[in-house]
Amino acid sequence: MTVAFEKYDGAGNDFVVVDADGDPVEDRAAFARVHCDREVGVEDEASARHGADGVLFLSLDVTATPPRVTMTLVQPDGSIAEMCGNGARCVAAWAADRTDASTFDIDTPAGTRRAVVDDEVAVEMGVPTVDPAEVPLAADEPLVDTVLDELDGTPAAGLAVTAVNTGVPHAVVFVDDVDAVEIDAVAPPIRHAEAFPEGANVTFASADGEGFRQRTYERGVEGETRACGTGAVAVAAAAKRLGRLDTDDEWVTVSPPGGDLAVSVPDDGPARLRGPARKRFEGALPVPEDDRIAGVTGEAALGADRLDDTPAGGRDQ
């Protein structure tokens, strides 16, 4: 059995998108684990890049005003993310490709988010919070620019952490140069720190003119991604709280490896995230059973080969 899919990209975050109406995927976690795999998952023939940062299962209600999309993001480890900024922007682009509308309400586990599609895609991100109960934290006090004693003896020792929830928990660390961070060594001790009972995404940032450069190690991906929208908002929110913003402009540029994002963090309203989002290609993917594709063995069972003549990456658009 196969399922139709489309591949969307939002500033470097790439997602497999499946229309959940009539969706034949019973085990969504297994589907995500197989096809998001960066070694042998879905292939983008144009870039020879495999895998994805997650699978978006979407249901579009065109009778609502504005049109409404129910968004479920299954991450590469099979878990469900409460919110994903770049994922939500890709959702809006997907919905715009199917309707004449430019404004959409997106229902996520973190709440409903309004998105607007123009030359770029902007989405409301909710109000960032450092409240320990909302992040959540193990402690009763906010974690703001604080060195965690439990990180002593790890590659993350001595780093000051600010914890903020932007739909998902982020541990934000400001450094002199994000490129100098050995992220695969430094991030995991913070991501799994006891201070974060549900774990945390770990986002590193360094000043870049009036904006910031960003690198994020994502919970659920368990590695660095080319972009992270909730992380970009976390950088701007933490920078504002710590007095690190060097501009009075409404929008702050935050630049992950995948491209520039614009973030607005007002004093009295939800944060907003703006940037590019587009469809890259489409195709069909086999539906796996128990993390393996039925009738296929060996490496091919993880998605390196396909059951029909359609290329693994589908058709370029």
Image (spheres, helix red, strand yellow):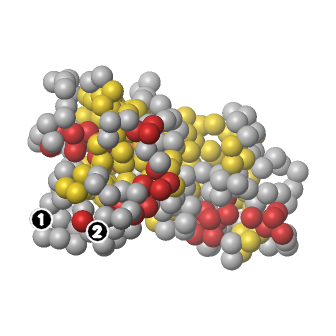
* Relative height, residue 121 to residue 160 (above, below): above
Tell me the amino acid under the disc marked 2: Glu
Q: Residue at x 56, y 56 (%)?
A: 55
Closest to the observer, 9 or 118:
9
- Amino acid, disc 1: Glu
Residue found at x 40% / y 39%:
178
Q: Position of residue 77 (x, y in %)?
A: 55, 66
**Residue annotated with mark 2:** 150
The dot on residue 141 is: 1
The residue carrying pointer 1 sits among few (fewer than 14), some (14 to 19) or many (20 or more) residues within 10 Å by Cα, namely few
Whether residue 74 is visible, yes or no, is yes
Name which of mark 1 and mark 2 comes first in the sequence.
1
Q: Residue 41 location in percent, x, y?
A: 70, 55
Whether residue 90 is situated above or below residue 1 in the rendered picture:
above
Which numbered disc, 1 or 2, marks the residue closer to the eye?
A: 2
Examine the rendering and report whether any part of residue 1 can be seen. no
Relative horizontal placement of residue 10, taking residue 67 as reference (left or right): right
Closest to the observer, 227 or 151: 151
Residue at the limit of the structure toward the right, as seen here? 309
Report if the CB atoms under discs 1 and 2 are less than 8 Å apart.
no
Query: Residue 210, position in %: x, y?
Result: 26, 24
